[in-house]
Image (spheres, rainbow, N blue to C red):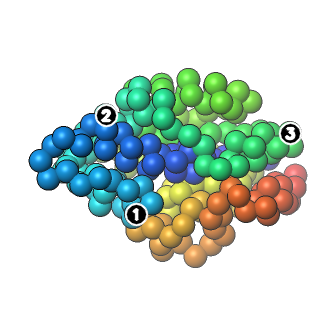
């Protein structure tokens, strides 16, 4: 059976928006504070917008693992609806990377908002360098926003999600810019049918 394997951060949920909001809440009274604008994020680590904490990636990881992050995170428009429709024809697998604390929070969030989805966590400590390439994605369609995850995957079909950013600009394959694209469901459905 074929599967849809899909990333969490900045693929089905707008993590950049939530991190920028959280950053603005936490750092607004600091000297040299400049509000972070998620629509202007062009770096995967958000260092171009969250400048007061960009020197310390542990601080960014803490934001991604905070309770507040999971209170304000939200789906990209039409992502949840599209995944619900796709769950009627295939297994949905959320393959997401993060620290152990971040992953535990994601599991709770996903179980609440996408109870039909299976979860494949990839816990990283910042030094292993394996990423999602350790996950067998044979006989699947894989959607992710990060080009390294796409390229290293053994998925039969790979779709890069989102607009062109520094972390994905080198990708020349199939790209889904938005879940609002009325063809998103049908493109994924056709690719899944090809695998069966």
Residue 69 visible, this angle: yes
- As rendered, which of 177 and 190 lies closer to the eye? 177
Where does residue 59 sit, x and y in percent of width and height? 25, 39
Which residue in the protein does label 1 denote?
40
Label located before the other in sequence (3 or 1): 1
The residue mark sitting in front, 3 or 1, is 1
Residue found 66% across the figure and 69% down from its top: 174
Tell me: residue 118, above or below residue 86.
above
From what the image shows, is residue 118 above or below residue 195? above
Q: Is residue 1 left or right of residue 7?
A: right
At numbered mark 2, what does the secondary structure look like: helix, strand or loop? helix
Q: Assign a secondary structure to mark 3.
A: loop
Numbered tag placed on residue 147 in the rendering: none
Q: Is residue 91 left or right of residue 70?
A: right
Marks 3 and 1, how far apart at CA: 36 Å
Residue 116 or residue 41, whichever sits in front: 41
Residue at position x 74%, y 30% in the image: 116
Q: Which mark is residue 62?
A: 2
How far apart marks 3 and 2 lie (CA) works out to: 36 Å
Which residue is label 3 attached to? 88
Mark 1 secondary-structure assignment: helix
173 relative to 10 in the view: left or right: right
Marks 2 and 1, the one that precedes in the sequence: 1
Cβ atoms at labels 3 and 1 below 8 Å apart: no
Q: Is residue 138 visible?
A: no
Rendered view: 116 above or below 172: above
Q: Could you tell me residue 88's position as x and y percent? A: 86, 39
């Amino acid at each position: 059976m074929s599967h849809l394997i899909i990333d969490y951060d900045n693929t089905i949920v707008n993590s950049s928006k939530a991190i920028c909001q959280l950053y603005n809440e936490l750092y607004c009274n600091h000297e040299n504070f400049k509000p972070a604008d998620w629509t202007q994020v062009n770096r995967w680590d958000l260092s171009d917008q969250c400048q007061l904490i960009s020197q310390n990636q542990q601080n960014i990881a803490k934001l991604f693992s905070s309770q507040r992050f999971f209170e304000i995170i939200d789906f990209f428009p039409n992502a949840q609806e599209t995944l619900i429709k796709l769950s009627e024809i295939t297994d949905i697998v959320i393959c997401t990377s993060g620290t152990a604390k971040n992953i535990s929070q994601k599991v709770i969030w996903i179980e609440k908002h996408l109870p039909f989805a299976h979860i494949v966590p990839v816990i990283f400590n910042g030094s292993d360098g394996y990423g999602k390439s350790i996950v067998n994605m044979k006989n699947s369609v894989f959607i992710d926003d990060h080009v390294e995850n796409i390229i290293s995957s053994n998925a039969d079909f790979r779709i890069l999600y989102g607009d062109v950013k520094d972390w994905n600009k080198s990708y020349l394959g199939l790209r889904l810019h938005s879940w609002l694209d009325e063809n998103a469901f049908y493109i994924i459905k056709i690719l899944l049918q090809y695998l069966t």
